[in-house]
Amino acid sequence: IIRSETIKVDKEVLFAVARASDGALRDAESILDQLISFSKDRVSLKDVISVLGIVEEDILFEITDKIINKDAKGALELLNTAIDQGKDIGVFVNNLIEHFRNLMIAKITQADPKLIDLPQDICERILKQSKQFTLEEILAVFNILVSAQEMSKKLDSLRIPLEISLVKLAQGKREE
């Protein structure tokens, strides 16, 4: 489609579209159509982030670094910045859970690119970051983030449970 439309697309855009469409070709075509109409002759990762509301990989790495460094204040500030930039908090949590899934896969497989569907440089960053956690800590993060999603249904707000989770993760032990 991209070749027939003579549109320039960054490699990262294709990965983002594939992830957003979750393997569904029609969804990928629909997303691509939205991106083309939004950005005309060149589609950048910034366009994808704007149109789909996804969270940039850098933010996921930064917030994970805040957890590693026990910087609860910094984690809360990053979350607040993302919200101020118009990020959907539900998408944010899902992307953070996916990031920790990638950390788990990297920890177990040494970042096998067949199992982590991201560009090689991102896979290398994930592998490096995964070494900062034990497998048990990564699994504990999953539990805490999923609990935040469940708590959000009772509170009718995801921000508060996510903030509690980030503070919990960035304070003391992560194996709770």
Image (tube, helix red, strand yellow):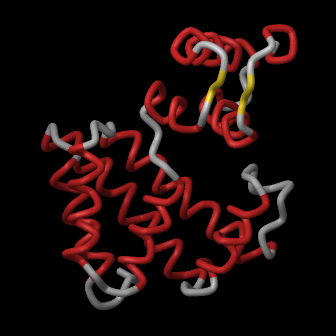
Q: How many marks?
A: 0
The image quadrant where one finds the N terminus is top right
Q: Single out the residue that lies furthest toward the bottom.
A: 172
In this picture, is 36 found above or below 91?
above
Q: Quadrant of residue 73?
A: bottom left
Q: Single out the residue that lies furthest toward the front.
A: 41
Compared across the picture, whether 43 is left or right of 110 comes to left
- Residue pictured at 28% horizontal, 62% vertical: 78
Counting from the top left corner in percent of width and height, residue 48 is at 54, 31
Compared across the picture, whether 10 is left or right of 129 comes to right
In front of the other: 176 or 68: 68
Q: Quadrant of residue 156?
A: top left
Counting from the top left corner in percent of width and height, residue 127 is at 69, 75
- Residue pictured at 28% horizontal, 36% vertical: 86
In this picture, is 160 found above or below 38?
below
In this picture, is 83 found above or below 86?
below
- Residue pictured at 41% horizontal, 40% vertical: 91
Counting from the top left corner in percent of width and height, residue 176 is at 35, 80
Counting from the top left corner in percent of width and height, residue 77 is at 21, 64
Compared across the picture, whether 73 is left or right of 107 comes to left
In front of the other: 155 or 96: 96
- Residue pictured at 86% horizontal, 54% vertical: 114
In front of the other: 99 or 44: 44
Compared across the picture, whether 15 is left or right of 137 comes to right
